[in-house]
Image (cartoon, rainbow, N blue to C red):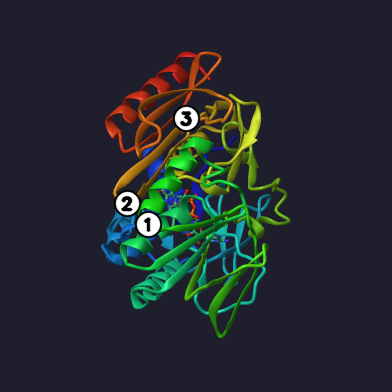
Amino acid sequence: MEAIRRVVVVGASLAGVRATESLRAEGFDGDIVLVGAERHLPYDRPPLSKQYLTGDWSADRLPLRPRSHYDDLGVDLRLGTAAAGADLQAGRLDLADGGEVAFDGLVVATGATARTLPVEALAGVTVLRTLDDAADLRRSLLRRDGGRLVIIGGGFIGLEVAAAARSLGVHVTVVEAADRLLARVADRRAGETMQALHREHGVEFRLGVGVSGVRGSGRVESVHLTDGSTLVADAVVVGIGATPAVEWLAGSGLRLDDGVVCDSGCFAAPRVVAAGDVARWYDTRSGRLIRHEHWTNATEQARRAAANLLNGPDGALPYVPVPYVWSDQYGLRFQTAGELSDSAERRWEGNPASPRFVTRHLTDGRLTGVVGMGMNREFIARRRQLVAEHETIGA
Ligand SMILES: Cc1cc2nc3c(=O)[nH]c(=O)nc-3n(C[C@H](O)[C@H](O)[C@H](O)COP(=O)(O)OP(=O)(O)OC[C@H]3O[C@@H](n4cnc5c(N)ncnc54)[C@H](O)[C@@H]3O)c2cc1C
């Protein structure tokens, strides 16, 4: 395979920025073009539901890097420019504004977009994925001190928004269709502990019930639930997950199935790799295709994908991470590493009924996952142990 001379990275956020940095760190001295649909300098998303939402941080603290960083790296940064299609045979990226960019290597890093509810579009109803979403929500929360916020979805984003809103004196109700919180990312016990913590801070919960409608005249006034009850609302946040941003790749020949489907080395095609929330790759440890929507994954996968792109599929190393997620709520850090399951044997340190604990998950006597809250030092030690065991078994 001829050496790659011009790489286009689509998606100017965490995975895209890390990919450009890794290309240079690997010694690539050809052209790099970084194309991003948003007009903002690439920024960090985690503070959007935390320090930025509470008003503790202003927007100027959010960029991942200063503008000069891209000049220093020799990256041609094209913001406010969405990709509309890719011709892999011709090595051509089509832009929504009618322009084109040639490439001989492509990094897909378009992340995910927030899922919405099929309800009437009303002012005061928002998702939280972008800086623009967060700016709208922040304005609404800061203006409505003492108002009523309904959060639809009891996952990380919903709960972080709940914590931020409570710190601003807003009345919060979380509605979750499952019978417990954090159902997709943590075990039942951790979800219950988190719920108790939020209750202590005055958050109300409606679990095991769906949303049948959101009503208002122009602006949201109420949320209607499937059990027939109604919640009064001045603002609504819909936090029900995200969908990989792959529409622009329809017809490109890449396999699209809950993300861009990749092999274990993050290759979607011989000169195309994907990384971050958009990538669904073959995990050699579980023998399954998996996709992660977390900060650390976007960083680590972008590094591996960029190095593999330069080395080619034959020289590619598999991407086999030990997943890690954190979430900050009420000044406490909730963290998980590895695989968590309700069926694993669990060993607790600290008090599992309090927000200060570390739980080891064991499968057939082997450490397979760690959950922690508040006990950072202990969590870090257990996470290290998990990574070491993972490396020992060569998974
Ligand atoms: C509010 C919030 C809080 C979070 N908090 C945490 C946390 O505490 N801990 C944690 O582990 N993770 C957290 N995450 C998750 C983490 O931020 C994501 O996993 C990470 O941003 C993924 O990076 P990415 O680059 O893959 O995708 P994204 O950050 O989604 O970026 C993709 C970029 O591609 C652009 N794009 C999409 N389509 C196109 C196109 N056709 N052309 C050009 N550009 C396009 C998008 O506009 C976007 O800028 C949080 C996420 C959110 C939204």
Residue at horizontal 57 percent and vertical 49 percent from the top: 278
Q: Amino acid at mark 3?
A: Val
The secondary element bearing badge 1 is classed as helix
Residue 315 rendering spot, x and y as whole percentages = 54, 27
Q: Which residue is mark 3?
A: 322
Name the side, left or right, on which 125 lies relative to 246.
left
Q: Nearer the viewer, mark 1 or mark 3?
A: 1
The span from disc 3 to disc 2 (Cα, nearest Å) is 26 Å
Characterize the local packing of mark 3: few (<14), some (14-19) or many (20 or more) Cα atoms within 10 angstroms: some
First of labels 2, 1 by sequence position: 1
Q: Which residue is mark 1?
A: 163
Q: Which residue is mark 2?
A: 330
The span from disc 2 to disc 1 (Cα, nearest Å) is 6 Å
Residue at horizontal 42 percent and vertical 50 percent from the top: 14
Which of the pair 212/240 is nearer the observer?
Answer: 212
Q: Nearer the viewer, mark 3 or mark 2?
A: 2
CB within 8 Å, label 2 to label 1: yes
Which of the pair 376/287 is nearer the observer?
Answer: 376
Residue at horizontal 42 percent and vertical 28 percent from the top: 359
Residue 334 rendering spot, x and y as whole percentages = 38, 41
Residue 142 vs 34, above or below: the answer is: below
The span from disc 1 to disc 3 (Cα, nearest Å) is 28 Å
Q: Amino acid at mark 1?
A: Ala
Q: Residue furthest bottom?
A: 217
Residue 43 vs 304, above or below: the answer is: below
First of labels 3, 2 by sequence position: 3
Quadrant that contains the N terminus: top right
> Is label 1 within 8 A of ligand 1 (CB to nearest ligand atom)?
no
